[in-house]
Image (spheres, rainbow, N blue to C red):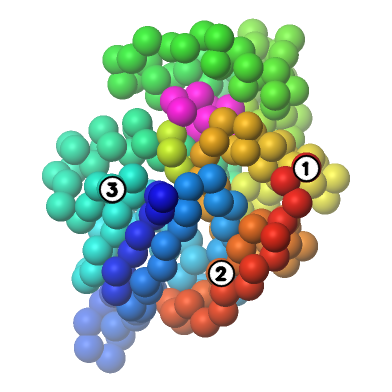
Amino acid sequence: MDVVKTHHLTKTYGEGETQVHAVNDVSMTIGEKEFVAIVGTSGSGKSTLLNLLGGLDRPTKGRIEVSGKSLEKLSEEELTIFRRRNVGFVFQHYNLVPILSVYENIVLPIQLDGNQVDTEFVAEVIKTLGLKGREDSLPSMLSGGQQQRVAIARALASKPALILADEPTGNLDSKSSQDVLGLLKQSAKKFHQTLVVITHNDQIAQLADRVIRIEDGKLFEVQITGGDWS
């Protein structure tokens, strides 16, 4: 089953001579439980593509389906609800609420949606990510790697079909980067979620099942890596 499908997806900024095709006629599919890395240089369009996949931005042309829903057909309110329930985001900046504890940060999106927290599932996510015992800590009491783990836990907690991570290790040292990516992979596999990671780091990309390269808004290479999930 394909979790993501795009059909001639295009995002254009500006007009006339200043017009830029940030994403240019992209058609692709991403399967259920697949781990895909999207790589490219700065300005290649990879973050714009990720924002389109997650419904954070709307395409100029083309179609995008996530879990069978055509995102371009949804109203802003419908899109907000769909994102909250079906897509988990992990960004380079952790975006944790400083006055909330680790646990409160993790369950905040679920509570904002008015849903009951699956405490057993959240406890399993916390354990998997090595945060057990830190539930009552404030973000300021954690290292950068630990804060990123909290951001990952928050993305996983609502049980979304799709996890989108934009340079999730960009603020971490190499050892912390490897640890966090390993945990993100392990968690996505364990909880049966599709994982898409944007990165400029080829070493990180080699952990994925498939590497998609993008330059000037166009996909020009798809590399099957057979990334090891262990």
The one of 22 and 121 positioned closer to us in this rendering? 121
Q: Which residue is mark 1?
A: 230
Residue type at mark 3?
A: Gly
Q: Is residue 137 left or right of residue 120?
A: right
Q: Is residue 161 left or right of residue 130?
A: left
**In the rendered image, the vertical position of residue 218 relative to residue 227, given as above or below:** below
Residue at 56 percent across and 69 percent down: it is: 212
**Label 1 neighbour load within 10 Å: few <14, some 14-19, many 20+:** few
Q: Which residue is mark 2?
A: 212
- Where does the magenta region start and end? 152-159
**In the rendered image, the vertical position of residue 19 relative to residue 26, given as above or below:** below
Q: Main secondary structure of the magenta part?
A: helix
Q: Is residue 131 left or right of residue 108?
A: right
What mark, if any, has residue 68 been given in the picture?
A: 3
Q: Report x, y in % for residue 108.
A: 44, 19
Residue at 33 percent across and 39 percent down: it is: 83
Q: Is residue 157 magenta?
A: yes
Q: Report x, y in % for residue 34.
A: 55, 51
The one of 208 and 152 positioned closer to us in this rendering? 208
Tell me the CA gap for discs 3 and 2. Answer: 22 Å
Residue at 52 percent across and 9 percent down: it is: 119
Residue 148 quadrant: top right
Label 1 residue SS: loop
Residue type at mark 2?
A: Ile
Q: Is mark 1 in CB contact (under 8 Å) with mark 2?
A: no
Residue 188 quadrant: top right
Q: Give the tally of numbered discs.
A: 3
Give the mark, 3 or 1, whose residue is nearer the N terminus: 3
Label 2 residue SS: strand
